Image: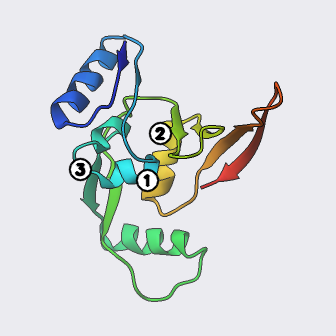
Amino acid sequence: MVIDEIGRPREVEAARTVKQRGVRIIASAHGDLRKLLKNKELRGLVGGVESVTLGDAAAKEEAMRKSNGKANGSFSKTKAQRMGEPTFDVIVEVRRGEKHEWRITRDAKVAVDAILDGQKYKAELRSRDSRLPIVMYDLVEL
């Protein structure tokens, strides 16, 4: 199934339902992966986001992990996490004005979890020279 420009909560839910039934989906939505996570109407495409409350010990452990083992005394008892499975396994980002360059995130679940954890995620940056019959790619952290 091909869906052009998912932009409303009902369309997000419909895409999720179709995927759960085993149908392959190719779809477009405005924004890169980080912007989709910030968009309340579209974040369901990448699994959704929920806030969880941590106990004192877990919050301290989380703060230590995020600060590479350096305790600074401050920590948050809430954490954002992915609610469910992303509707799409792979994400291809085509940026405005860059028709010869695109980014491919091969594991949406891992990328979303990294973003919500305040970390970078790996993607492929693919590009082509319109005069040559080759595509080049680099691994990047975003």
Which residue does the image show at 21% across and 28% down from the upper left? 11
Q: Earlier in the sequence, mark 1 or mark 2?
A: 1
Which residue does the image show at 32% across and 31% down from the upper left? 5
Disc marking residue 48: none
Q: Are marks 1 and 2 in contact (CB under 8 Å)?
A: no
What type is the residue that disc 3 sits on? Lys
Q: Secondary structure at mark 1?
A: helix
Q: For the residue carrying disc 1, how many other residues have a C-alpha within 10 Å: few (<14), some (14-19), or many (20+)?
A: some
Residue placed most toward the observer, 16 or 96: 96
What type is the residue that disc 2 sits on? Lys
117 sits left or right of 42 in the view = right
What type is the residue that disc 1 sits on? Arg
Looking at this view, name the residue that lies furthest to the front.
Answer: 131
Q: For the residue carrying disc 2, how many other residues have a C-alpha within 10 Å: few (<14), some (14-19), or many (20+)?
A: some
> Is 71 above or below relative to 57?
below
Residue placed most toward the observer, 29 or 120: 29
Q: Could you tell me how far apart the alpha carbons at marks 1 and 2 are, in whole angstroms?
A: 13 Å
Disc marking residue 109: 2
> Is 123 above or below relative to 69?
above
Q: Looking at the rendering, in which quadrant would you find the C terminus?
A: bottom right
The residue labelled by disc 1 is 34
Q: Could you tell me how far apart the alpha carbons at marks 2 and 3 are, in whole angstroms?
A: 18 Å
Q: Earlier in the sequence, mark 1 or mark 3?
A: 1
Q: Could you tell me how far apart the alpha carbons at marks 1 and 3 are, in whole angstroms?
A: 12 Å
Which residue does the image show at 25% across and 20% down from the upper left? 17
The residue labelled by disc 3 is 40
Total marks in image: 3
- Residue 101 drawn at (x, y percent): 65, 41
Q: Nearer the viewer, mark 1 or mark 2?
A: 1
- Residue 45 drawn at (x, y percent): 33, 36
Q: Secondary structure at mark 3?
A: loop
